[in-house]
Image: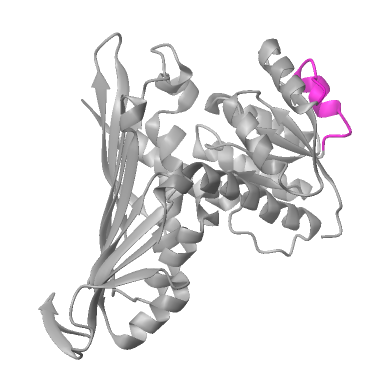
Amino acid sequence: MEIKELKIGIIGAGGFSAFAINAFLKIKGIKIVAVTDVDEKAAEKMATDFHIPVESDIHNFLKNENVELVYIATPPFLHYQQSKMALLAGKHVICEKPAALKTKEAEELRSLAIEKNLLYVVNLMQRYNPLFDKVNSIIKHKILGNFLHGFFENYASDENLSPDHWFWDKTKSGGIFIEHGVHFFDLFSGWLGKGEVVNSLEIQRPFPKKMVDRAQATVLYNNSPVNFYHGFDQPKILDRQEMRLEFERGEITLYEWVPVKMKLHGLVTSDQLANLRKMTGGDNIVYNDDVHTKNKKVRGRFTEINYDNEITLISGNIEDKQKRYQELVTNMLIDQWKWIDDPHHQRKIDAGNAVESLRMAEQASKIAQLF
């Protein structure tokens, strides 16, 4: 890239900001030049930890000529206002999810960025995962046939979420679909195309006060359903996530909310197996039948299926979760920086991802039955 240096200012000095800064600083030429937060102690701690100056408030921060790109990691109800202020101040913007609490606000931010020739993107980093690309190739080449059904199950922890945390307050978080679900609406849309929410529900816990801690939505992708479940009600030690995509000749299972392990089971011809090896880089493949017996036939969906092998393929390792998460954030920033340098660069995500994922999340939230 011709640009040798990119100077980033941070709005929001919480734990995830520190995580993101460590990911950003892996990129040569990235400089963190300022931080601001309404919590002065948090800002001072971040300033000490990363040797960066503190700006007393957001107005002084946005006047800082050293800040070229603003990274926003504050609670969701502040994202729209802070992103708009940064864009109006002539700064590029990377914001944590969601873009805003309303789709029309995200659309406004996208339009404002286009008008001012500035970067605006929400950190929906799932598409930078190498497992995203592997699954995408398998789907596009129909290695397992047509997609039929999928699910994402998020058994998450509430151990560090006190009853007064902003997460439980819909006016601040937008609710589970908007605050958290956008990641997975965007992920599955990347594989399957545009989805439409057909039903959803939210379930409250009554004690110590009413709060929605579980949510579920069903989304149709080209007439095939995907079920999304999010529950925040367990100890940290039990936290786990799993997603599955079922096809005519097998299924793919992914583990963790940032997928780090993939298991594929299915029926493939010799040609499909050769293509699969290329797509997955020679991951471990186990043959579940006699490899010397070819030209097998079975029936499914009233159609004859010809295959040579029943296989199980394993890719990745659960232990790589934190390392993978940081890599995705790093890769996201590299991709967006390339666009700043050359607006003709085709990014993996742009402002359209922010708008579309929020549209689905807002739709799920609006039609949800409350129990």
Residue 176 position by quadrant: top left
Position of residue 113 in the picture relative to residue 269 (left or right): right
Q: Nearer the viewer, residue 1 or 174?
A: 1
The main secondary structure of the magenta stretch is: loop
Residue at the image position 87 percent from the left and 34 percent from the top: 66
Q: Nearer the viewer, residue 312 or 24?
A: 312
Marks counted in the figure total: 0
- Residue 230 placed where, x, y %? 32, 36
Q: Quadrant of the N terminus?
A: bottom right
- Residue 42 placed where, x, y %? 66, 16
Residue at the image position 44 percent from the left and 22 percent from the top: 167
Q: In this orientation, does residue 202 appear?
A: yes
Q: Residue furthest top?
A: 208
Residue 277 position by quadrant: bottom left
- Residue 61 in the magenta stretch? The answer is yes
- Residue 141 placed where, x, y %? 40, 77
Q: Quadrant of the C terminus?
A: top left
Residue at the image position 29 percent from the left and 14 percent from the top: 210
Position of 149 relative to 15 (above/below): below
Q: In this orientation, does residue 124 appear?
A: no
Q: Residue furthest bottom?
A: 295
Position of residue 144 in the picture relative to residue 13 (left or right): left
- Residue 41 placed where, x, y %? 68, 11
Q: Which residues are magenta?
A: 52-67
Position of residue 290 in the picture relative to residue 90 (left or right): left
